[in-house]
Image (tube, grey):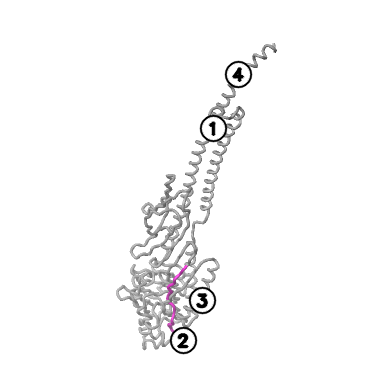
Amino acid sequence: MRDRRRPGSFEFHREDRAVSVTVGYVLTLAVGSLLLAGLFIAGGSFIEGEREQAIHGELSVIGERVAADIMTVDRLANQSADPDNLTATRTAEYPPRVSGDDYTLEVDPDSERLVLTHPGSDVAVEVPYRATENVSATTVAGGDLTIRWNGDEDAKHIEVVES
Amino acid sequence: MAAVSIGPGPGSGDRGADGTDRGQLIIITGLTLAVILVAVVLLLNTAIYTENLATRGVDAGGTEAAEFREASAADVSELLVRTNWSKPDAVDGFGGELDRYGESIADHRTHEGVIARVSGEPTEGTFIAQDEARSFEPTSNYHNGTADGDEWTLVEGTTRTRAYTMDVGIEGDSMNESNVTSDAFRLRVAGDDATDWDLYVYQPSDGDITVRVDGPDGTQTVDQSGESVELNLTAGTVNGEPWEPLSWAAGVEDDADIDDGERNEYAISYANGDTVSGTYEFVIDTPDGAATNGSDSALYSESEDGSPYAVESVYDVHLELRHHTPELRYEDRIRVAPGERDA
């Protein structure tokens, strides 16, 4: 029985093996490609999400520091008995780029807010501040800034300018 | 792309199809993973920097600058009071003291990496006082025979007064309320274009001491028990307790922030000084030259033992402050006048 089946099974096994190699290879490729594509998609969106979160965090921190500096100058101006002759100039160093892209900082005195916009990722952050003195409305590019008191006779205000 | 091509490529055998092509898939997968990991690392790096930035103190030296201003004002205020007491030549003496103070502050702050400077210009004034407890009358040779109880002027042509303290005891009999304005001790602050501000101290029939103020808000009184009453007229306290109606020269003296030399002038006078006794002292912002030309010249030239006298003094000082750090440049001007009404 063994002698009769062995040659036949040998034939069948050999054909079967040839097919299984191809099928196995195709399956491996398909599964591999699927895995790869999944990895790309999942990894890409994960990275994108994390990137936006990191940009959001960094813009918030920068915005809060600018707000703190504006309030520092405001406090000094508010306490001064002679605002005409007051000098209060804060020179601050901020990162010029966030996650590899430029950003802008807008001062909106009407709503007492700083709006930081990152065009590279469409992330915008609003940071509130509170000032007793006037703050002039302006939009500056991110980077090193000077926040200073301007004691002009008629229009005393705090201004934010690029260093 | 070899990795996704089906079947072995040209020249590759069965072993190549099993080994090399699969290896490419692993390499590409590995590379992709590596790229993703590098991106994650870069992002984490940004996040760590952000966290680091966030944990740094947000105050860029504003508090330090404000403290510097307050500390300088307090120190110079003490210096001013001390110099007025100890130096006969108060204005020059104070100038020297202030220079020395500025130098020591500059040296001290340099060690902390701060460029600091304190300089100032003192305003000459006059210190008028009666140190010995006696009646609030001038001396006998003042005004050539001012009669007891008459009104006499201590100063005129002054615009500001500070640190006015008075310790008053009653000498005469208790007084009927209806006679207060004519018979009680009265301190009057009279300006050219303003209603007079009057302060009365007397003993009503119940034995207490009454302090009465006639000002823009009408007549207000407060009763104090005891032998004498301690008034701080510019600080507005009676026996150390704040009493709101006691607002020095309200309606006569201009607010302290008017500082351009066009302030209202006024005179300070006493009447019925023989009904009280005690001590008083105050500083006015008018220097000797102007004061000696006025009716109070005798305070300077003819003082006797125990009589009220006037000496040169520093009224206030305009300080210029500078506090520079790499982060914050702060320069400000302040006026120091210890014991002023609005101070």
Given the image, on which type of amino acid does mark 2 rest?
Asp
Q: Is residue B119 above or below residue A108?
A: below
| Residue identified by numbered label 4 | A15
| Residue indicated by mark 2 | B305
Magenta stretch, main secondary structure, is: strand
- Quarter of the image with the N terminus of chain A is top right
| Measured Cα–Cα span from mark 1 to mark 2 | 117 Å
Q: Earlier along the polypeptide chain: callout 2 or callout 3?
A: 3
Q: Nearer the viewer, mark 2 or mark 3?
A: 3
Residue at image point 48% right, 80% down: B93
Badge 3 element = helix
Residues at marks 4 and 3, common chain?
no
Q: Where's residue B329, x and y in %?
A: 46, 64
Identify which residue, A34 or B217, lies in the foreground: A34
| Residue numbers of the magenta segment | B304-322
Reading the image, the residue beneath label 3 is B100
Q: On the same chain: label 2 and label 3?
A: yes
Task: Give the left or right position of residue B27, taking residue B278 as reference.
Answer: right
Q: Nearer the viewer, mark 3 or mark 1?
A: 1
Q: Quadrant of residue B317?
A: bottom left
Label 4 secondary element: helix
